[in-house]
Amino acid sequence: MLRLIKNAHLYSPAPFGLGHILTAGERIIYVGSVAPELPDQLQAEVIDVDGAAVVPGLIDGHAHITGGGGETGPASRVPPMVLSSFTRAGVTSVIGVLGTDDLTRNTQTLVQQACGLRAEGLSAWCHTGGYHVPLTTLTGSVRGDIVFLDPVIGVGELAISDHRSSQPTLDEFLRIASEAHVAGLMTGKAGIVHCHMGDGERGLSMLEQAIAACEIPARVFNPTHVNRNKPLFEQAVALARHGCYIDATAFPCEHIEPGISASEAYIQFRDLGGNADRFTISSDGGGCLPAFDRDGNLTRFGVGLSDTLPETLRDLTDRGVSLSEALAPLTSNVADLLKLPRKGRLKVGMDADLVVLDENTVVRHVMARGEWHVRDGQIVQRGMYEQV
């Protein structure tokens, strides 16, 4: 199927201006200021968006696609995420992770869920391992999982500075980073260690020590949830100067304190002279969002949703950040970190993942791999068991 989107303000995420974009199957085959002439015999679908913004599909770099939770017993396990929980938010690519429960959920189930989402039209990958050391793997090693399992691109989320962590030593941490890095070199995959950062007073000290102690490139060490409290965020700003990518979580409003919002974190990071190309934002979708007291008792919880990503995009533009700049932490920056060469940009040869936004920066249409999943704000494709 050929699909021509006409009269769009295109963002790649760099602004292109008013133009047209043509997709064929799962790829973009034309982007330009002159609308291509298409013979009637091709039966192309033509959609005039009348000047609306067309942007790359969002990439959610941290989601619990098999469900998170489990901190307060079997009933606290979050169900697996369904297709439309991503697409309704403009997310066309997702990276699955395991969290606290990396025992009853494992790399096998994570890989299978990623493959299931792929079969339903999304682009999906995952990390191997979870919060704890020894890491849960499928082949028996980090390197084996990344090299031999197509969806696996790195390690994560490995818990650091958290009472739920297995408290890895620096040597253990470096060995994991080495395995991930070498596997990345062998395959061209990201090969990162995606680190869950808790509220512990040690903060990012282990990552600082690791970078100082070894030859592994700083980009391999990728902390997430860096905006969960202000001291941690200040450390993350300093860590990024070594060349790390740092990832802020788009927490729901009621779960921001004692930290700062992802949009505020981005603006502060940029204004402090941080390299904005190395800042990403993810949702923690499907993950339990617990808060604990000093004794480790649960005081409240919620569930992350990918919907917080377009909300963060809108918040950034409302704060005066240009749409092209606001898109980068949700699209091109994530694609660069994760080495997804056909994602995060609207260019010829890229995957046909795009979102049409209305004048209020609200998701209007969503195309994933060349197929419409959302039209006029309504879900038109659902996962198999969403329809039961």
Image: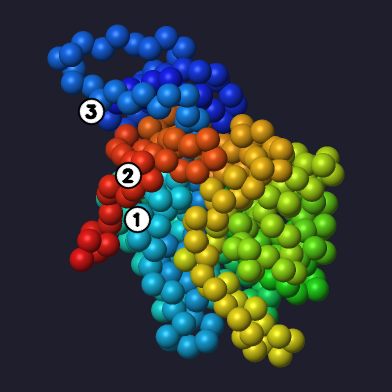
| Residue 285, x across and y down, in percent | 50, 62
Number of marks drawn:
3
Q: Secondary structure at mark 1?
A: helix
Density class for disc 2 (Cα within 10 Å; few <14, some 14-19, many ≥20) is many
Density class for disc 1 (Cα within 10 Å; few <14, some 14-19, many ≥20) is many
Q: Nearer the viewer, residue 379 or 55?
A: 379
Q: Residue furthest left?
A: 41
The disc, 3 or 2, on the residue closer to the chain's N-terminal end is 3
Rendered view: 200 above or below 314: below
The residue sitting at 71% across, 85% down in the picture is 293
- Residue tagged 2: 373
| Residue 135, x across and y down, in percent | 53, 70
Labelled pair 1, 2 in contact (Cβ < 8 Å): yes
State the mark number for residue 1. Answer: 3
> Mark 3 belongs to which amino acid?
Met
| Mark 1 → mark 2, Cα distance in angstroms | 9 Å
Specify whether 127 is left or right of 301: left
Q: Is residue 301 visible?
A: yes
